[in-house]
Image (spheres, rainbow, N blue to C red):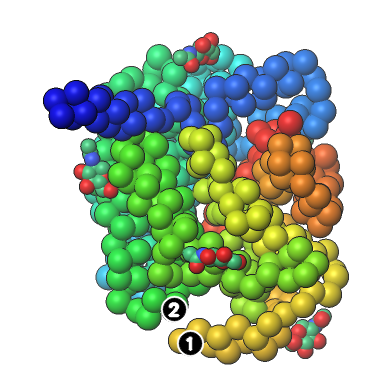
Amino acid sequence: MKFTSFFTLVGAAISTSAAFVHPGLLHTAADLTRVADHVNAGDEPWLTGWNKLINSTYAQSSYTPHPVQLLCRGSPASCSENYANIYRDAAAAYALAIRWKVTGDAAFGTAAANILNGWSSTLTEISGNSDKYLASGLYGYQLGNAAEILRNFSGFTDANMQAMIELLVNVFYPMNHRFFVDHNDAAVDHYWANWDLCNLATMMSTGVLSDNQTMFNEALDYFYNGAGNGAINKTIWILYDDGTGQVQESGRDQGHTMLDIALLGVIAQTAYNQGTNLFAYEDYRILRGAEYAAKYNLGNDVQFTTYTNSDVTQTVISNNSRGNIRPIWDLIYNHYVKIEKQTATYSQQYADLVRNDGGGADGGGGYYGTTSGGFDQLGYTTLMFTL
Ligand SMILES: *[C@@H]1O[C@H](CO)[C@@H](O)[C@H](O)[C@H]1NC(C)=O
Ligand SMILES: *[C@@H]1O[C@H](CO)[C@@H](O)[C@H](O)[C@H]1NC(C)=O
Ligand SMILES: *[C@@H]1O[C@H](CO)[C@@H](O)[C@H](O)[C@H]1NC(C)=O
Ligand SMILES: *[C@@H]1O[C@H](CO)[C@@H](O)[C@H](O)[C@H]1NC(C)=O
Ligand SMILES: *[C@@H]1O[C@H](CO)[C@@H](O)[C@H](O)[C@H]1NC(C)=O
């Protein structure tokens, strides 16, 4: 008996402490080395992706952050909207962190650190109307990814990292959690999938950054079994014989359908880097959704099953924003084709399309317009995910 409990304790300690890989959100150390090596060797398509990044106004060491104490998204609300501040700054922090990592030039690391330190020392509350839950979802994982790349920069101290973790744990995570529990007091199927998915991405990222297995598992459990539309069987809710799967927002518009794929990519990549393969989960279910979205947006017909929830009945797929361009596809394409060895006919074509749209590589925040949609995802997937 004595020995049994001794070994049980040892087992528990190992499984909870040594669990997380760092850096290990969107990019591992090996990924970051691969990117730097290809850029420094002048290899394509990395070089084109890199030139897009260094040409961006969001990747300059002179970038000035604009942190706020009360972050406001949604109107009308008691506060006045200022969320462009955080999506611009998060895009800049990520681009500058990559620029530091590839060049080793501390000026870029310092600029990225200043952005993160500005937010971690200033932001205390996220408010607005219901859209505040988009802010708690979309921007937490983005700041977190910049911090994770900077983890190993001498100008971003342990105390700086701890402050960023505390911002995510104390301001973002409670909203992620609350949204999963009560969905802002709406019917559980009211909010479109991207609302759950962005909060899931931030919760999962915060779990990794803070080495909290409980939090990471809460996000994973929601992906598998959640009650709302961000659970995988509800986001990609019906499968077809051609290998595609209808996406929950397909009858709404294609921009949000593409956002669902973007966020599933973030969630699956983050989990993959921590040893859990959601890309392959349920017979490559995420790929089926990506293939469906890409197939339709390329101009092909797709099967459509009437979608019904508490609010809407949609009998046809929406052609609103068909052909929507988001910098997300080289994550999907490279993983499924080169790692999982799957056929990804339409995702591959869409990756080609978005790469060609950018002259050989996709861009990042700021390259796809000034409004929030161009900043919903971090982008630069050709540079960061080409294998
Ligand atoms: C660099 O950015 C400017 C706008 O800031 C744009 O006009 C130009 O095409 C970009 N060059 C490349 C190589 O992306
Ligand atoms: C930190 O980054 C440098 C290069 O930027 C690398 O040589 C070093 O191995 C990294 N250390 C860790 C612990 O990742
Ligand atoms: C980990 O996160 C959970 C919420 O998921 C929280 O209750 C717990 O206190 C956290 N653990 C630590 C050590 O911070
Ligand atoms: C999700 O759907 C698959 C079939 O497509 C099924 O095998 C699985 O049990 C479902 N999972 C949940 C949690 O409902
Ligand atoms: C878009 O969809 C609407 C409604 O289904 C349809 O009436 C319209 O013809 C479609 N437009 C195009 C360009 O396909």
Give the secondary structure at mark 2.
loop
Q: Secondary structure at mark 1?
A: loop
- Image point 50% across, 19% down: which residue? 107
**From this viewpoint, is residue 290 visible?**
yes
- Determine the residue located farthest toward the left in the rendered image: 2
Which of the pair 345/355 is nearer the observer? 345
Mark closest to the chain's N terminus, 1 or 2:
2
Residue at coordinates 68% horizontally, 35% vertically from top-left? 385
Question: Residue most toward the front?
Answer: 1
Quadrant where the C terminus is found in the figure:
top right
Q: Residue 32 in the image: x percent, y percent?
A: 60, 24
On the image, the x and y values in percent for residue 1 come to: 15, 29
Instruction: Give residue 94's position: percent from left, percent from top.
Output: 52, 35
**Mark 1 burial class by Cα count in 10 Å: few <14, some 14-19, many 20+:** few
Q: Is residue 108 left or right of residue 147?
A: right
Residue 357 versus residue 291 in the image, above or below = above
Residue 316 in picture, x, y percent from top left: 71, 85
Examine the rendering and report whether any part of residue 111 can be seen: no
What residue do we see at 34% from left, 64% from top? 179
Query: Closest to the observer: 65 or 16?
Result: 16
In the image, is 66 to the left or to the right of 309?
Answer: left
Q: Nearer the viewer, residue 94 or 2?
A: 2
Picture quadrant where residue 361 is located = top right
Q: CB atoms at circles 1 and 2 under 8 Å apart?
A: yes
Total labels drawn: 2
Is 49 above or below relative to 311? above
Residue placed under numbered mark 2 in the picture:
190
Q: Amino acid at mark 1?
A: Asp
Q: Residue at x 34, y 57 (%)?
A: 176
From the image, tell me which residue sits under label 1: 311
198 displayed left or right of 213:
right
111 or 327, nearer to the observer: 327
